[in-house]
Every structure is written in C-alpha cells, then in structure tokens.
Image (cartoon, helix red, strand yellow):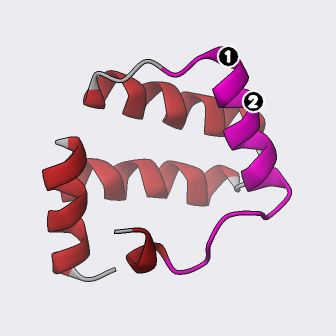
Amino acid sequence: MSDETFEKIKKKSGVDKDTLISLASMVEQNGLKDENTLRLVINKLSGLTGKKVSKELEDKIINAVVEDKVPKNIDKLF
C-alpha cells in the first residue's frame, strides 16, 4: 500500500501505519482463515477507533474474509 493510502486510513480511523503493519503481520503469521486471529484484529481495531463492533457484525466480517469475499485492492476502498 502507498503512504497516501495509509494517510487516508489514519485520517478516517485514527490508526497509524505502524499499528496497521503490526496487525497485518499478525494476520500474515496466522493466516486469513484463522478465526481467533481475525477476532483479535477486529477487537483491537474496534478499540483503537472507538467503534463498537457487535458480535453479529464481527461474525459477518469473519465470514466474508474466510470465504474470500473482500476486495483485493484496498486502495479502492479509500
């Protein structure tokens, strides 16, 4: 991802590049199919952004990731 994308993410969420890279590393080590890792990342991001994620939404996010239904190009999301 470009620095510009990281800046857009930080502006929208308040989460900095180093934190995102750390979370991405955690996912990379454990894989995108590991539900426990995904729940940990979701909860950590929820806490960092101050946005509560319901159990139902968390399950939907995990389902989308596990079933490979998320965009491949994150730059397009921002």
Q: Which residue is mark 1?
A: 55
Q: Which residue is mark 2?
A: 59
| Labels 2 & 1 near each other (Cβ < 8 A) | yes
For the residue marked with disc 1, what is the amino acid? Lys
Span highlighted in magenta in the image: 53-73
* Residue drawn at the location 34% of the way across and 22% of the way down: 47
- Label 2: state its secondary structure: helix
**Residue 21 shows which numbered tag?**
none
Point out residue 54 in the picture as x, y percentages from the top left corner: 59, 17
- Left or right: 39 as drawn, with respect to 59: left
Which quadrant: the N terminus?
bottom left
Point out residue 53 in the picture as x, y percentages from the top left corner: 52, 22
Q: Residue furthest right?
A: 67
* Residue drawn at the location 58% of the way across and 60% of the way down: 28
Where is 57 relative to 33, above or below?
A: above
User: Could you give the CA–CA distance between mark 2 and mark 1, rounded to whole angstroms?
Assistant: 6 Å
Viewer-closest of 37 and 52: 52
Where is 62 relative to 55, above or below?
A: below
CA neighbours of label 1 inside 10 A, class few (<14), some (14 to 19), many (20+): few
